[in-house]
Image (cartoon, helix red, strand yellow):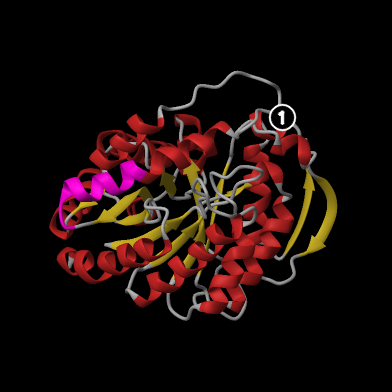
């Protein structure tokens, strides 16, 4: 079982952006101290839902601040960045950290980000497969050129080569955020593990894993490769003396953050969107995930692993919105929950 912290750098009502970023950095530092396996970093633009605009930049800082723990992006949004630029950053972090970096990528949403960064709606609606394939080639081949719909350039050498210096000789692991059957199929055909969202229950995640395996078999992936796929389940963790107390901690803080954060998203083309009710969503998350005393948290994580076959977790630990409470939560997760998982 590999339990990690999912860090959004969430800006709660009444907080400054620097405060949110400081809490994100401290969360990662304490996660290593507490024995967690990984830290996963989100990125967002122009919204207080998360004030980290570059997960790879924050990953670089945290890889320098830590010595053991793995740092991953959850996720770097491909439609708003050039795949080669992202590939260069990933290779740099992979090599300089001794292989502790994982690159998570996703499609993102139809947000105004696409306008600001000049990539356009087409990059979101149909450009993700081309971007992903170019990124994978950059991380696996010594020279790369492109002649696609969105990217076209002469062949150039890959510098730095992500497969140098380390054993075994391979680049950073890549994982894909999947929210639809189309994205599951895309990941499976390329043999890439999935990052599954915190809004999904065990039954839905188990179904996505089963569909991934079927698509991987259809694409000719070997049984060994399919069995080795290290999918990641996103969730929430709030450790407390009782289930009621831990739930109340989240219900007190998360709805306000969700309301102001989600309302701030602006679509690039003015399309209407439906926002989840913040109170109902918080209650849903508390019912699905590791929220309660240590033994209950451990039971829910073990049950998810058994039902879905997923043994890696990225758990949102900053749901209280408070720095000291977040640090305590991470320490309890490492010191009281992990030992119960063996």
Relative placement, left or right, of 341 versus 49 is left
Question: Residue 333 appears at what percent x and percent y?
Answer: 27, 64
Q: Quick check: is 244 in the magenta stretch?
A: yes
- Answer with the quarter of the image where residue 323 lies: bottom left
* The image quarter in which residue 336 lies: bottom left
Q: Residue at x 29, y 35 (%)?
A: 283
- In the picture of the structure, the residue carrying the numbered disc 1 is 121
The quarter in which the C terminus is drawn is bottom left
Q: Residue at x 44, y 39 (%)?
A: 256
Let me know if residue 140 appears in the view.
no
Residue 239 sits in quarter: bottom left
Foreground residue among 108 and 276? 276
Residue 242 in view of the camera: yes
**What is the span of residues highlighted in magenta in the rendered image?**
241-252
Q: Quadrant of the N terminus?
A: bottom left
Q: Is residue 225 above or below residue 273?
A: below
Viewer-side residue, 123 vs 217: 123
Furthest toward the top, the residue is 272
**Secondary structure of residue under mark 1:** helix
Q: Which residue is rendered at x = 20% and y = 49% of the image? A: 245
Residue 191: percent from left, percent from top: 47, 49
In screen coordinates, is 291 left or right of 31? left
Outermost right residue: 154
Give the percent coordinates (x, y) of residue 93: 61, 70
269 within the magenta span: no
Q: Residue 337: image x %, image y %?
A: 21, 64
Q: What type of secondary structure mainly makes up the magenta span?
A: helix
**Classed neighbour count for the residue bearing mark 1: other residues with Cα under 10 Å, few (<14), some (14–19), many (≥20):** many
Foreground of the two, 184 or 14: 14
């Amino acid at each position: 079982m590999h339990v990690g912290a999912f860090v959004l750098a969430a800006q709660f009502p009444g907080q400054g952006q620097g405060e949110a970023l400081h809490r994100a950095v401290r969360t990662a530092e304490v996660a290593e101290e507490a024995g967690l396996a990984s830290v996963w970093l989100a990125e967002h633009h122009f919204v207080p839902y998360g004030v980290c605009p570059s997960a790879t930049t924050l990953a670089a800082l945290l890889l320098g601040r830590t010595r053991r723990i793995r740092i991953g992006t959850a996720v770097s949004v491909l439609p708003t960045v050039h795949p080669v630029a992202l590939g260069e950053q990933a290779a740099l972090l992979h090599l300089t950290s001794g292989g502790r970096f994982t690159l998570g990528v996703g499609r993102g949403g139809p947000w105004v980000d696409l306008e600001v960064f000049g990539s356009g709606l087409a990059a979101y609606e149909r450009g993700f497969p081309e971007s992903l394939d170019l990124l994978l080639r950059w991380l696996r081949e010594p020279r790369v050129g492109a002649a696609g719909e969105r990217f076209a350039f002469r062949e150039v050498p890959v510098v730095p080569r992500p497969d140098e210096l380390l054993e075994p000789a391979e680049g950073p692991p890549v994982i894909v955020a999947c929210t639809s059957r189309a994205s599951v199929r895309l990941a499976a055909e390329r043999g890439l593990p999935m990052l599954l969202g915190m809004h999904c229950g065990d039954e839905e995640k188990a179904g996505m894993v089963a569909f991934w395996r079927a698509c991987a078999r259809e694409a000719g992936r070997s049984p060994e490769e399919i069995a080795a796929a290290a999918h990641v389940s996103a969730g929430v963790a709030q450790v407390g003396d009782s289930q009621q107390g831990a739930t109340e901690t989240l219900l007190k803080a998360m709805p306000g953050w969700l309301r102001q954060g989600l309302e701030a998203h602006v679509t690039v083309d003015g399309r209407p969107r439906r926002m989840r009710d913040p109170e109902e969503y918080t209650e849903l998350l508390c019912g699905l995930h590791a929220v309660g005393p240590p033994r209950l948290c451990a039971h829910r994580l073990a049950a998810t692993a058994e039902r879905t076959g997923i043994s890696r977790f990225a758990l949102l630990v900053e749901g209280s919105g408070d720095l000291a409470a977040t640090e305590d939560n991470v320490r309890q997760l490492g010191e009281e929950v992990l030992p119960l998982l063996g």
